Image (cartoon, rainbow, N blue to C red):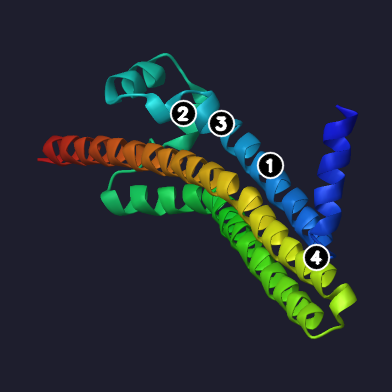
Amino acid sequence: MSELASEILDIWAKGGWLMLPLFALTLFIYHAVLELLLRLNGHFLARSGYDRISDIGINHALRSGDWTLRRLLALDASSRVEVRRHFQEVRAEYMPTINRRIRFLSVLITAGPLVGLLGTVVGMLTTFDGMAGSDTSKFASVVSGVSEALITTQGGLIVSIPAFVLLSLIIQKRNQLECCLSRLEQFNVRMAMRRDSIEKSSVE
């Protein structure tokens, strides 16, 4: 285990000074990933199972007195416009924060390969400087520059590729919440239209 740790540290040192900002970027990325996953998995729509509930299940939950669902729906709405306005407010309360964090995470993930690319450029410059030097230090400088270029590029990709996979999972969970709200909105619209038709028929 100690040999593995020393080997990792040796590779890290060969990556040059850009490995430090890459490490800080890694911490930011995976902290943001973890926070978003916890936020989405802990969202009350996911905890309560509303993201998988059918119209029959919604009717049953309303009849059984599910107060969370009753607060989420506009039960007193009598038109499509009222329902849409209500769900615009619901989305404005729950979704913008998640969307902002997803955009911020996308920027962080995109920065990973760019830092690796910058490391490639710095490593190549070191290589060229070494080639222009004296014969005694030329080989060591070339090897050092190539190592720095390859290690930082590899590091940027290693950081970003799993993060891209996790980001797609986060976007999928966000889309599930959006679909849940859309399904509840459509249910609420049908309920409001039935209420409106019943009121009109009673007036006539």
Q: Mark 3 points at which residue?
A: 44
Give the mark nearer the N terminus: 4 vs 1. Answer: 1
In this rendering, position of residue 3 left or right of residue 90: right
Q: What element carries label 3?
A: helix
Of the numbered discs 4 and 3, the one sitting upstream in the chain is 3
Q: How far apart are marks 3 and 1 (CA)?
A: 16 Å
Question: Does residue 158 appear to the left or right of 52 in the view shown?
Answer: right
Residue most extreme to the left: 204
Q: Which corner quadrant holds the C terminus?
A: top left
User: Of the residues tagged 4 and 2, which is closer to the observer?
Assistant: 4
Q: Which of marks 2 and 1 is nearer the N terminus?
A: 1
Q: Name the residue under label 4.
A: 144
Of helix, strand and loop, which one carries label 2? helix
Discs 4/3, front: 4
Which residue has dot 2 on it?
Answer: 69
Residue 157 figure quarter: bottom right
**Which amino acid, by three-letter code, is at mark 1?**
Glu
